[in-house]
Structures are given as structure tokens and as C-alpha cells.
Image (cartoon, rainbow, N blue to C red):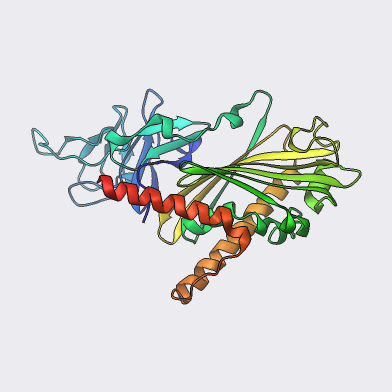
Amino acid sequence: MFVKNSWYVAGWSDEVGQQKPLARIMLGEHVVLFRKTDGSVAALEDRCAHRRMPLSLGRITDKDTLICPYHGLTYNSSGKCVHVPGQDAPGEIRIRSYPVEERAGMVWLWMGPPNKAEIDKMFDCSWLERPGWHTTRLYRHAKANYLLLNDNLADLLHVAYLHIPSGGGSEDMGSAEMDLKIQGDGFHFERKTNDIPAPAGYGRLSNAQQNIDRWHLLDYQGPSFYRVHTGVAEIGSGGPDSDLPVGFGRWDILPHHFITPETEDTVHYFQVVGHEWVPTSDSWTFLNNVIDEDVWAIEHQQTALCAEPDIPMQTIPSDGPLRAMRGIVENMLAVETQTQ
């Protein structure tokens, strides 16, 4: 089951154009997106009401309409059929349209009832728009349930072990104390370690000349958004508040994770990383290796769960944020069910 009353990323802004419709599956629903002549984006269910032909295979007109490639029925950006060949008036033929917002270089859809769409429920992306900052964007299509990806991002113990190959892991993180504060439909979580050897990737990119202090500050907003501030700095320099120059004893990043379920067994994973430093081939390789390790893990979990679905997963003390996330999603689903 999916939380419908939320904004989900449908794609990057530059994926949606005026020349060709974009097809996407979100929360099990087939959606088509296209850009109108005024630059705004429209989103409709990806089917013609006549014979269920995908409209994403059709074409966009200069009148902000989509023409079905099968029989020529034409739909405007609100989903109303405005032309049926051989018929004077198309009647009340209509398909679903979705509320759309564009923010931080991404297109967002509200997947619940349109009358419940609330702009103030959109995720805060202001950190990605800081003056002088750069962003690196990443995308993966993963063959796993979206909650496994949510688990992964809420579970910081895995950073200590799963990310050793990429140079982002360090077993010292496994013993760090946790500070978790639940806040409504989300939580804030901190994990810090001091005076430890720098993990290979962080050490290389920070050019730290001695042991480092490391931090991982995480904000979760249900059902599927994470903002993280993680990094390293030479010991005693202030940790996340360090004023050391980037690359001269400090290196940190602000990954924003946007999780959009595709089906029960697949997920769209969008990540935008904010940072002060200018991207390099080394940083690009590091960030891609880290995300690939996460996808590798959850896809293997999904395979195991499908093979033996009745074997329960056990919990350990470090699963606190993970359990909190699952509880928040379950509560959001329950609230939706009660208000339907």
C-alpha cells in the first residue's frame, strides 16, 4: 500500500518537454507528463478513455493537448476530451489529471485527491538553492519495495559496513551513540563520532592530515523524503559547524533523497546532493558508488523476501530510526483509510 496524500517526484524538470510526452509509473498508476506552451507541466493518467491506448505514445499539439495515436481522441491539460473524430461534441469523456508543482529542478505530483493537495506539505528543498552551492543529481530505478529503500536511508549502521568498498564506510560509526527525536510525520536523527581515522573516500576528498570527527544528521519527512548532512572535519574543528575550507581538512555533503514507489516491487530513487565544492570526477565516482551499494543491498533483500516471505526480520537496537519510519508510514496510511 502507498500513502497517496503526498507530493512525489515524477522526474527531473529537463525530462519533461514540449516535443514528446514522458511516461512514468508512480504508486502503481500510469502517468503521462508534458510541458505546455507557457512552460508549466501537465500530468494525466496515461490512457485514452476509448480503448486504453497509452497517451504517452501520442503527440503534443501547440494547443496544449495530447492526441491519442490510436483513434485521434484529443485531451486538454485538465484531462477533458476536447475532440473525437467524426463527432461534433465529445460529451463528458474525461481522464484523471494530477496537481503538479515544479521545484528545485524536479517535477512533483500530488497522488491523492486533488482537493486535498497542500503546497505546505511539499518537502523543503531550500538547502539545494543556497547561493554559491553546487548540486549533483543521481537517479536509480531499483527492483525493490520502496520501504526497503526507506529502511536503508533510516538505518545508519549500514554506513559502517555496506559502504566500505566505496570509501564511505568505517566500522567506528557502528558504535556511535544515536539521538532520535520524532516530530509529527517525521523525525530528526544524529550520529556523531570523534577522533577516528577518516574513511578512505572522505579522507581523500577532505585531505585531512590527521584523525577526523564525523557526523551524520538526518531529517525524515513521511512518507518518503530524507535530507542528510554528513561529513568529516579534522578533530576539534567544530564538526558540522567547522569553518575549515572544503578540501583542506573538511568535506561534507547535503544529500536529499526522494523516493517514489513505482510498483510494490520497484521504486524510483532520485537523489540531489548539495555541496560547496566544485564537482570532480573523483567526487562523481564516489557518490555513484555509494548509491550503487545501497541499490545492490535492497535488491538482494527483495529477492530474499520474495523467495521466503513468511520468515520475519529481526530487530536490533540500532533499528530505532527504521522502526520510527515504519511507524510513521503506517500511521499515515491509517489516517488516509479513516478519512476516505
**In this view of the protein, can residue 157 be seen by the observer?**
yes
**x 46%, y 45%: residue:** 222
Q: Is residue 145 left or right of residue 277?
A: left
Q: Position of residue 273 (x, y in %)?
A: 63, 39
Say above or below: 112 vs 102: below
Asked whether 155 or 146 is in front, the reply is: 155
Q: Is residue 149 left or right of residue 161?
A: left
Say above or below: 317 vs 270: below
- Counting labels gives 0
Q: What is the quadrant of the N terminus in the image?
A: bottom left
Q: Position of residue 99 (x, y in %)?
A: 34, 34
Tell me which corner region of the image, top left, top right, bottom left or bottom right, holds residue 113.
top left
Q: Position of residue 269 (x, y in %)?
A: 52, 50
Asked whether 319 or 20 is in front, the reply is: 319
**x 65%, y 23%: residue:** 131
**x 54%, y 32%: residue:** 125
**x 24%, y 36%: residue:** 79
Q: Is residue 316 left or right of residue 112?
A: right
Say above or below: 64 vs 322: above
**In this view of the protein, can residue 141 be seen by the observer?**
no
